[in-house]
Image (cartoon, rainbow, N blue to C red):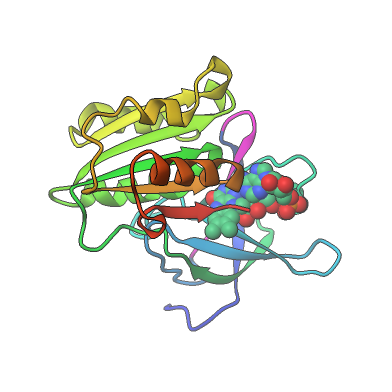
Amino acid sequence: MPMSGFPVTLRVRDLRNAGPHAYALNLERDAAELEWQPGQWASLRLPVGPHPPLVRAYSFAQPAWVEGPVPLVFDDVPEGVGTQYLKSLLPGDSVEVGAVAGKFVLPDPLPAGIVFLARFTGVVPVHCILKELERLGNPPSVTLISGAPTSGDLVFHEALTELAERASWFTYHPVSLDGGRDELSVLDKIPHFGHDVVPMVSGVRAFTQPVRACLMERYGYERRAVRVENYD
Ligand SMILES: Cc1cc2nc3c(=O)[nH]c(=O)nc-3n(C[C@H](O)[C@H](O)[C@H](O)COP(=O)(O)OP(=O)(O)OC[C@H]3O[C@@H](n4cnc5c(N)ncnc54)[C@H](O)[C@@H]3O)c2cc1C
């Protein structure tokens, strides 16, 4: 049945580990036909915090056309009020979705190339967008630089490695931050990084802000030409 409006209540199908410090939360979607564009997020209304509901956004990990539950992935923020509640959810528990929104979506028309830079769970909307690109007939050339505290924390690492092996249009650069490199040091090594390439940056501001500044100062991008999804 098509969804008539928000908020909508979805049931938890399951909660799994998505690495040592991240969780995959799958929500049943038979109660409502939730629609979203790849790169968008759901606004969850959580019954915790000093003034409930506590509103927290989580990006969709798969496009809406992929069958199955609504897939969200969150990292384990120590003492994070929303995170600690989400971690406690059990199958059958209800979760209230207040809205679906977001502008971190594919540029229209598609550019010649896209460079994604993501840190930790910042890769969640990127994974969703890549699934959509894979479905397109003639996707642009896409590079993903994905960083995480350790190699074990790289979210979607296996799926992204496999995509890079089968898709000639996609290049994947995982970066383990405990190895003495960061995402920007990898960016420097990408050849032909020109202005027909759209940069898209996702994660916490401690990551997105210096990356945007670098793209402006070192590569000459205008501020608005760098698409950013800030998590905090
Ligand atoms: C558009 C959008 C999309 C988002 N998508 C995702 C997603 O797909 N997966 C996901 O894990 N989070 C996502 N977030 C962040 C999420 O909404 C919460 O902010 C995060 O889970 C922390 O909430 P909390 O209540 O547990 O932490 P709070 O109690 O609010 O504490 C926040 C503190 O944790 C730090 N922090 C560490 N890691 C994160 C993080 N990942 N996000 C935000 N703050 C962090 C912040 O810098 C801040 O100091 C998104 C945020 C936005 C605005």
Give the quarter of the image for residue 7. Answer: bottom right
Q: Quadrant of the N terminus?
A: bottom left
Residue 11 falls left or right of residue 78: left
User: Which residue is drawn at the image coordinates 24% and 63% (left, top)?
Assistant: 108
User: Which residue is drawn at the image coordinates 63% and 28% (left, top)?
Assistant: 20
Q: Is residue 46 above or below residue 152?
A: below
Q: Which residue lies most toward the bottom here?
A: 4
User: Which residue is drawn at the image coordinates 19% and 52% (left, top)?
Assistant: 136
Q: Is residue 64 above or below residue 124?
A: below
Q: Is residue 89 above or below residue 190?
A: below
Residue 25 falls left or right of residue 130: right
Q: Is residue 86 visible?
A: no
The spot of residue 161 in percent (x, y) is: 34, 27
Whether residue 22 appears in magenta in the rendering, the answer is yes
Residue 70 falls left or right of residue 56: left
Q: Which residues are magenta?
A: 19-29
User: Which residue is drawn at the image coordinates 46% and 53% (left, top)?
Assistant: 228
Q: Which residue lies most toward the right here?
A: 50
Q: In terms of depth relative to the viewer, which is nearer, 122 or 158?
A: 122
The spot of residue 88 in percent (x, y) is: 75, 48
Whether residue 48 appears in magenta in the rendering, the answer is no
The spot of residue 189 in percent (x, y) is: 32, 25
